[in-house]
Image: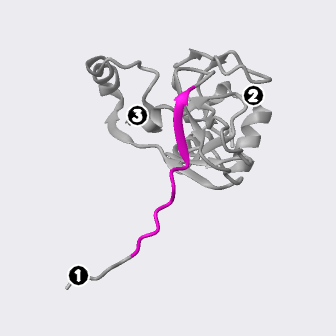
Amino acid sequence: MQKNTKVDVEPEILEIRSSGISGKGSFAARYIKRGEFIIALAGEAIVTQDVEPHCAGLGISGDDPLQIGDKVFLILDYKSKTINHSCQPNAGIRYKSELYAVRDIQAGEEITYDYSTTSGILDKWTMNCGCHANGCRQTIGNVLSIPSETLDHYLNLNVLPDYIKLQLKLSGRL
């Protein structure tokens, strides 16, 4: 005898569509309250030395992997890869790869986070910014490229990955 069970499924929180920032973007399918969990960015975990050959083999940009540890990156899945950067983001990463709203987000608004918050202090990576936000930094770099006032704001919002907070602490910057 089978037991009937009802499972409540959370409706999709994101819609993927064309973005004014870059390519495809993730947009709020409904109102998202400040502090609310949005999505865990997901993908295949690889070590630093495998990033370049792995990206080349997949035909993706070396800018696409998400750094989640000193020497660990995620080759992001499609949904995770559609979350674009902004110098004035409405979301941020906590823990390892969990995305949370840093302010109330209206339905239809593009979800963004600051890519610099995931790039370690020794990382030499940079890319041009196309976010068009007020106060755009024009170039995205490692966590130390974030203006100190903005970095303090991110710390207060608790939207720096754990490994970045540890790096900042060990370097005496926290």
- In which quadrant will I find the N terminus? bottom left
Kindly identify which numbered label has been placed on residue 164: none
Q: Position of residue 165 (x, y in %)?
A: 60, 45
The answer to whether residue 72 is visible is no
Where's residue 58, x and y in %?
29, 22
Measuring from the top left, give residue 128's x and y in whole percent.
Answer: 60, 13
Magenta segment? 6-18
Name the kind of residue labelled 2 in the image. Pro
Q: Nearer the viewer, residue 107 or 39?
A: 107
- Mark closer to the observer (3, 2): 3
Q: Earlier in the sequence, mark 2 or mark 1?
A: 1
Judge whether residue 120 is colored magenta: no
Residue at 46% over, 43% down: 41
**Picture coordinates of residue 33 (x, y %)?**
70, 54
What amino acid is found at the position of numbered circle 3 in the picture?
Tyr
Residue at 71% x, 49% y is: 157
Which residue, given by chain and number where applicable, does mark 1 sit on?
2
Q: Which residue is nearer to you in this view: 147 or 32?
A: 32
CA gap, disc 2 to disc 1?
59 Å
Specify whether 121 is left or right of 33: left
Q: Which residue in the rendered view is the most extreme toward the bottom?
A: 1
The residue beneath circle 2 is 147
Q: Badge 3: how crowded within 10 Å, few (<14), some, or many (20+)? A: few
Magenta stretch: helix, strand or loop mostly: loop
Amino acid at pointer 1 = Gln
Q: Secondary structure at mark 2?
A: loop
Membership of 12 in magenta stretch: yes
Q: Earlier in the sequence, mark 3 or mark 1?
A: 1
Which residue in the protein does label 3 denote?
A: 78
